[in-house]
Amino acid sequence: MIQGSIVALVTPMDESGAVDFNQLKRLVDYHIAEGTDALVAVGTTGESATLNEEEHLDVIKAVVDYTAGRIPIIAGTGANATTEAINLTRRAQTAGADACLIVTPYYNKPTQEGLYLHYKAINDAVDIPQILYNVPGRTACDMLPETVGRLSKLKNIVGVKEATGDLSRVKHIRDLAGPDFAIYTGDDASSREFCLLGGNGCITVTGNVAPKLVHQMIKAAIAGDAETALAIDAKLTALHKNLFIQSNPIPVKWAVAEMGLISKGIRLPLTWLTQDCFEVVRAAMHQAEVI
């Protein structure tokens, strides 16, 4: 089971919006040096919505190659068409990903039975560990714990990223899915409590900016060391909030650029962070002692 601080990696781009693979390699090395436990390539934070299919797979393959087995790589392969999700998942497997993160179909709002059959089709088609991803705030589709429980019985479905921020779902899903099923949060602000309640880690945005602190905090929380986790999380509280002052990944890309790790590149319809937000995000970075 992959556990700990799993960073939803930004995709570096130049000012024209082209992917910068040299900076991507530098980011991978940076995260490994800082203690990040695993990386998600081309998730929401990696701008999966605006990369075309070939770019999507090129970034996954590059991250796998640059990592060279040092930490696990989870590929974002979700889509709102089941056939497209199967194709992306199959190609990510070929590219060498260790697992896939598959978001619920967005916009078309399937039923719970539709969700079950969607994920079952991917499970049956591609023999790679698969992590469900529930983020109703973005998809307008809430995969209920009972559906996660059903899906947990399938061979290749090994975990869920539960990004509702609802802490009661940790126990609910654990009771339905059992002790060997990985339960991750996608909500940085409640990640400490989530892991103290028995979660297995956080697929984190904040970890792009403060990877060492997030790794230490999540590790302490998983170990049940509430005091240490709270002390570390106090430094991260402002980042958890202010990295979402505009739509993700707008603030986090600005922050990583401010650290000198990437260029000022993002793809439309997303735009660069507006100047009125600079000091708010910068203050949060100072609190976390990353600048």
Image (spheres, rainbow, N blue to C red):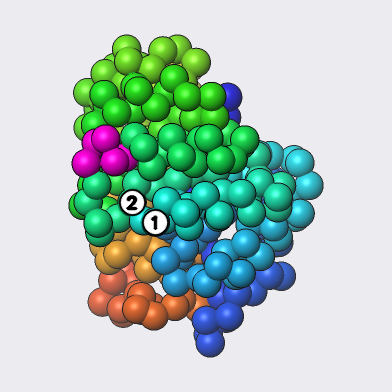
Whether residue 105 is visible, yes or no, is yes
Image quadrant holding the N terminus, namely: top right
> Mark 1 falls on what kind of element?
loop
Between 138 and 282, which is closer to the camera in this rendering? 138
| Residue 114 in magenta stretch | yes
Q: Earlier in the sequence, mark 2 or mark 1?
A: 1
Residue pictured at 24% horizontal, 31% vertical: 144
The residue indicated by pointer 2 is 105
Q: Nearer the viewer, residue 251 or 162?
A: 162
Please, is residue 70 above or below residue 209 in the view? above
Q: Which residue is painted at 42% across and 38% down in the image?
A: 119
**Circle 1 is placed at which residue position?**
81
Query: Which span is picked out in magenta?
Result: 111-115
Q: Residues within 10 Å of mark 1 (few under 14, many from 20)?
A: few
| Image-quadrant location for residue 163 | top left
* Residue at 25% across, 59% down: 107
| Mark 2 neighbour class, 10 Å CA radius: few under 14, some 14 to 19, many 20 or more | many
